[in-house]
Amino acid sequence: MIRMRLQLWHVVLLVVSLALVISSVQAQDDAAYLQHRQKVMQAVGGHMGSIAAIMKNKLPYTTTIVVHAQSLQVTSTVIEDAFKKEITEGKTDSKPDIWQDWDKFVAAAKKMGEESGKLADAAQSGDMAAIGAQVKELGKACGGCHKPFRKPKEERFKR
Ligand code: HEC
């Protein structure tokens, strides 16, 4: 009888430790996906920041804006894939609304791509007024996704 109880206890222990292993693998997996999607966004932020620095300081890099804008356009095409996996726990500023309103999220990424393309065109023309106006439109496209789908500043996780 005691022997049987011991065996049962072993089974319980085994199941519990297996469950722990599985959930920690899951958490590691999620952390890796979160890291990737945040790096994608940082790349986006880097290009946008470079454009802002050129504009703000009137640097003679108008043609460089073409490259940044094209990079943003290309990068916008990986957003859908980068956010496909639903992760609402852990170090993330993504709102669960992303996966409840997936089509709207994808449309917001597409909009960012379109506005980036228009900025590349404007930058090619060299017309500063047109570039400035289009940078604003692109900024609105960032907000068009951040507002519904990214947590507000006060709720963001701390690194
Ligand atoms: C389709 C939606 C979408 C668009 C478009 C978008 N973002 Fe984001 N962005 C997000 C989400 C969601 C997060 C939060 C990611 C997380 O923490 O899980 C984020 C996070 C960020 C971050 C913080 C990344 C970090 O370090 O964790 C930066 C910077 C950023 N976005 C910049 C931009 C800029 C600049 C644009 C426009 C050129 C832009 N984003 C367009 C959805 C979007």
Image (cartoon, grey):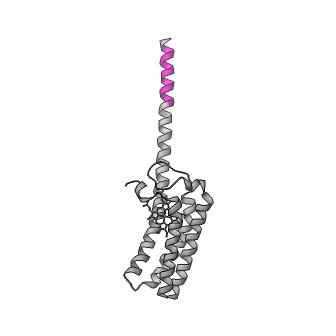
Q: Is residue 5 magenta?
A: yes
Q: Position of residue 36 (x, y in %)?
A: 48, 58
At a point 45% along the width and 61% down the height, the residue shown is 39
The residue at the far top in this view is: 1
Q: Nearer the viewer, residue 47 or 139?
A: 139
Q: Position of residue 50 (x, y in %)?
A: 41, 75
The span shown in magenta is 3-15
Q: Position of residue 44 (x, y in %)?
A: 47, 68
At a point 55% along the width and 51% down the height, the residue shown is 86
In the image: residue 113, left or right of residue 54: right
In the image: residue 54, left or right of residue 141: left
Magenta stretch: dominant SS? Answer: helix
Q: Nearer the viewer, residue 143 or 11?
A: 143
Occupied quadrant, residue 156: bottom left
Q: Is residue 66 above or below residue 49?
A: below
At a point 46% along the width and 47% down the height, the residue shown is 28
Q: Is residue 158 above or below residue 135?
A: above
Q: Position of residue 126 (x, y in %)?
A: 49, 88
Name the image quarter holding the C terminus. bottom left
Q: Is residue 46 magenta?
A: no
In the image: residue 155, left or right of residue 117: left
At a point 50% along the width and 35% down the height, the residue shown is 19
